[in-house]
Image (spheres, rainbow, N blue to C red):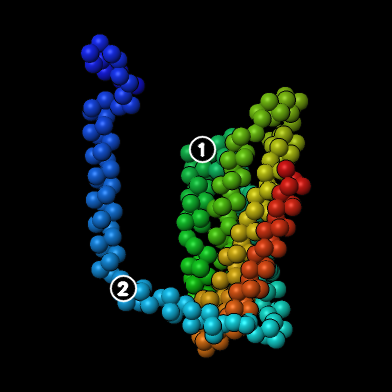
Amino acid sequence: MPIRETNSQKIWQRRTGRESLSHWAMWLVGLMIFAYCWQQISQATTWFFVWDAPRIANDIWTRATPPKWDYIAQLGEPIWDTLNIATLGTIIALFLAVPVAFFAARNTTPSALFVRPIALLIIVSTRSINSLIWALLLIAIIGPGVFAGVIAIAIRSIGFCAKLLYEAIEEIDEIQVEAITATGASRWQVMAYGIVPQILPAFAGIAVFRWDINIRESTVLGLVGAGGIGLQLSASLNVLAWPQVSLILLVILAAVVISEWVSAKVRGAII
């Protein structure tokens, strides 16, 4: 921190003159960028609908309440399909993510020059595309239905699970691995007794955490035809059946809250 002397008295300053100038210049550039972005957004926005939004929201709320409670009998199978999509997709993703994670980790990959870049490419590519986009592509390939939703969730989850798992593999205690290697154990024995026991807690936590996320993502896959309760939501929205929509949203909220509670309890037990 600079100290400036004035009349033989030392005055503390947070920044020098040059640092202050640079600081305010950065703020000015930031404000200019914000103003430009706001101008572009304003030109592409129909502000009449924005100002009229409170009235429209109140109208929809009036139409949607009370929920159509007798419609809940038709939501049992769709919410069950949603849970199956999330669960089966997570299981498939975990089976595929484990080898990808071992290939991506620096301390377990067979080849840092060839195999590891391929594994990292798989992780990045599967994580970078949203599950809705995967569902749209799969519906075009294998047709609409629950199976497309399961595969979409699985592909989307591979990169997430593999990334966290390979980071856990790279952070293991190498002393345990060296001790098992010193006994003359093979590569597979070292992996089974020196690496896997250390990453099992992380693996369990990742699995539960991803399953919790997939519950949320699977609820909307039906909007593009990939099965689950989102299909009922899409059908109700298309006919403007707002009491049914409100009930479906309440069921989705309940499913998400329960999955969050279950995952928190399981993670607490593991940790």
Quadrant assignment, res 14: top left
The amino acid beneath tag 2 is: Trp
Q: Residue at x 25, y 34 (%)?
A: 22
Please state the horizontal and vertical placement of residue 125, each as a whole percent of the image.
48, 55
Q: How many marks?
A: 2
**Mark 2 neighbour density, 10 Å: few (under 14) some (14–19) many (20 or more):** few
Residue 154 rendering spot, x and y as whole percentages: 60, 62
Q: Amino acid at mark 1?
A: Ala
- Residue 39 place in picture, x, y as percent: 25, 62
**Badges 2 and 1: C-beta atoms under 8 Å apart?**
no
Residue 139 against residue 70 in the figure, above or below = above
Q: Vertically, is 175 above or below 10? A: below
In front of the other: 238 or 136: 238
Could you tell me which residue is drawn at 47 percent across and 56 percent down? 128
User: Furthest-top residue in view?
Assistant: 8
Q: Quarter of the image containing the C terminus?
A: top right
Q: Residue at x 67, y 68 (%)?
A: 254
Where residue 64 appears, x then y in whole percent?
A: 57, 82
Question: What is the number of the mark on residue 47?
Answer: 2
Q: Secondary structure at mark 2?
A: helix
In the figure, is residue 167 to the left or right of 117?
Answer: right
Res 210 visible: yes
Q: Nearer the viewer, residue 179 or 204?
A: 204
Question: Could you tell me which quadrant the N terminus lies in?
Answer: top left
> Which residue is the site of mark 1?
112
Q: Is residue 125 left or right of residue 194?
A: left
Earlier sequence position, callout 2 versus callout 1? 2
Q: Look at the numbered disc 1 and give the secondary structure of its residue.
A: loop
